[in-house]
Amino acid sequence: SDLAAARQGTGRAVFLAAPAGVGKSRLLRELLLNAQWHDVEVLAGTCAEAGQEALAPLRQALRPLLATAGPDERERHAPVIGALYRAELLDPDALRVGLAAWIADAAGRAPIVMALEDLQWADAPTLGVLNELAPALGFLPILLLATLRGDETPAGSAAWFAVNEGHARVLSLAPLAQPATEALVAAMLGVPG
């Protein structure tokens, strides 16, 4: 499985793509619960359709790293942490590279599952960090999961960069047919189907 591979040091990126309402978020919650069960550090952030500051999904996702980072790690990544959480100025390229390096460094302490929801709404700096990190995932204990509405994400969007470069795979989800929905509900309720 992707989680087992990441725990062994061979990470990857997986995008769950489907129209709204198909169950991407529900599936992602189950995947994150499974990761927590396996003692993997879970980092999660959500992209908003409007009114969200640049890097807000990463600010949200990376906050747990502040609590688990030792003094040496915090010192090594102080400029990036300052730029992300205290609005200290840092060159955008240095910030992008530095954030990817901090995530990679943190994965040296414990495997990480990093999840971002609604990637179709991600800001350019957030996508820049993900696209910086994606090529290195095969050498890191990181599973990067993202949900996105594939039907609302243009082919040329930076959200598809990791996929187009072969650094991520897409799992396209479709709505369940009526018989499958009935069987699922019956199974969840413990009713013979």
Image: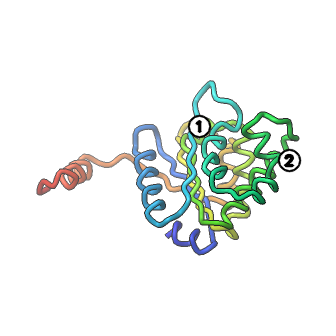
| Left or right, residue 98 beside residue 32 | right
Which label is found at residue 158?
Answer: none
Secondary structure at badge 1 equals loop
Q: Quadrant of residue 104?
A: bottom right
Where does residue 174 sit, x and y in percent of width and height? 41, 48
Residue pointed to by mark 1? 47
Question: Residue 158 in the image: x percent, y percent?
Answer: 70, 44
Check if mark 1's residue and mark 2's residue have beta carbons within 8 Å: no
Image quadrant holding the C terminus, namely bottom left
Compute the Cα span from label 1 to label 2: 22 Å
**Circle 1 Cα neighbour tier, 10 Å, few/some/many (<14 / 14–19 / ≥20):** many
Q: Secondary structure at mark 2?
A: helix
x%, y% of residue 7? 57, 70
**Residue position for label 2:** 94
Which residue corresponds to the image point at 57% horizontal and 43% vertical from the top-left? 45
Q: Residue at x 58, y 68 (%)?
A: 6
Q: Mark 1: which amino acid?
A: Cys
Most extreme residue toward the top is 51
Q: Amino acid under label 2? A: Ala
Sequence-first tag of 1 and 2: 1
User: In the depicted view, which residue is nearer to us: 192 or 89?
Assistant: 89
Q: Is residue 128 left or right of residue 178?
A: right
Residue in the image at 65% along x and 36% along y: 56
Judged from this view, the residue extending furthest toward the front is 71
Query: Which residue: 65% across, 43% down?
Result: 58
